[in-house]
């Protein structure tokens, strides 16, 4: 199947943005520039720029043009997860652990329609407060089915994988996206009965298996109470860290 022309252009320009052809805040290609360079219509050029803007790669300012987004993209930084438990004890409750075969998750994990995966739902506590809800979807080749006998076997999903497969997920490459979301799913929101406003940090994460390009060990999503979690980033640009 042929890739649409506008998608080819998006991939080319995204690659330029990701690999230092532009600096943050630089003037970017105009609609006219894209039309001339790629010999496409203005409709296609607008579609390209709209897509780049939606993906936070560029910023379009009325009357001034298009600029490279000032937000960091694929920058080399040191990332620290901030756990603001303030010395309170932490705990985990496993709500369920089972095999499943929903098509959309099979597609994300890149397994065939006849294959099962493990679905693990957990809560994390700080003191008596529920501060995190997580669902992990794990390629079933890397966890023993015998573990399903006892939910406590999944108190730490990564420890379970490590013991059953010998693979340490903490040492695998991953991609993670974090946004702030309004949570309107009552079945999840009810676990956070102390929260006055349903605003959460929402994370989606894919952990990749070694040696086989694109293969997925885990897909997970998490809702975190922002009162207890945060991030610190330290740029390593120009340093000797």
Image (spheres, helix red, strand yellow):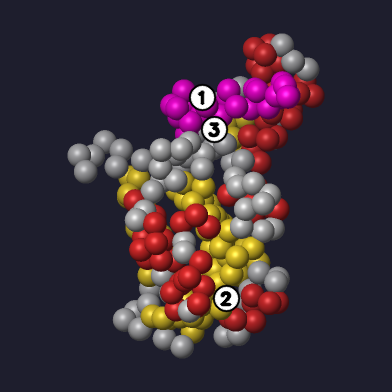
In the image, residue 104 lies in the stretch drawn in magenta: no
Asked if residue 58 lies left or right of residue 164, the reply is right
Q: Which residue is mark 2?
A: 96
**Dividing the picture into quarters, in which one does residue 8 lie?**
top right
> Which residue position is annotated with label 1?
16
- The numbered dot on residue 235 is none
Q: Nearer the viewer, residue 221 or 30?
A: 221
The mark that comes first in sequence, 3 or 1, is 1
Tell me if residue 171 can be seen. Answer: yes
Q: Residue at x 60, y 27 (%)?
A: 11
Which residue is at 39% across, 57% downward? 165
Image height check: is 193 above or below 111? below
The magenta stretch is 1-24
Kindly identify the residue that appears in the image at 34 percent across and 79 percent down: 86
Residue placed most toward the observer, 152 or 9: 152
Q: Element type at marker 3? A: strand
Q: Quadrant of the C terminus?
A: top left
Q: Within 10 angstroms of label 3, few (less than 14), some, or many (20 or more) residues?
A: many
Which secondary structure lies at badge 1? helix
Q: Which residue is mark 3?
A: 68
Q: Position of residue 235 (x, y in %)?
A: 33, 45
Distance between the alpha carbons at the discs numbered 2 and 1: 44 Å
């Amino acid at each position: 199947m042929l890739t649409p022309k506008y998608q080819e252009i998006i991939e080319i320009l995204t690659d330029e943005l990701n690999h230092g052809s532009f600096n943050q805040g630089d003037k970017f290609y105009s609609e006219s520039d894209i039309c001339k360079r790629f010999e496409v219509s203005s409709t296609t050029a607008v579609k390209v720029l709209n897509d780049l803007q939606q993906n936070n790669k560029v910023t379009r300012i009325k009357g001034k043009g298009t600029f490279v987004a000032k937000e960091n993209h694929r920058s080399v930084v040191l990332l620290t997860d901030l756990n603001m438990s303030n010395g309170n004890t932490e705990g985990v409750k496993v709500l369920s652990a089972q095999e499943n075969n929903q098509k959309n998750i099979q597609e994300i994990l890149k397994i065939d329609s006849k294959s099962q995966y493990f679905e693990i739902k957990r809560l994390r506590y700080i003191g008596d407060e529920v501060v995190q809800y997580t669902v992990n979807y794990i390629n079933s080749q890397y966890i023993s089915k015998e573990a399903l006998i006892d939910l406590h076997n999944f108190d730490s999903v990564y420890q379970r994988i490590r013991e059953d497969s010998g693979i340490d997920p903490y040492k695998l490459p991953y991609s993670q996206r974090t946004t702030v979301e309004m949570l309107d799913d009552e079945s999840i929101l009810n676990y956070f009965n102390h929260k006055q406003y349903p605003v959460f940090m929402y994370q989606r994460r894919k952990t990749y298996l070694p040696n086989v390009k694109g293969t997925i060990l885990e897909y997970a999503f998490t809702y975190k109470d922002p009162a207890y979690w945060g991030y610190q980033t330290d740029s390593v640009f120009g340093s000797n860290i």
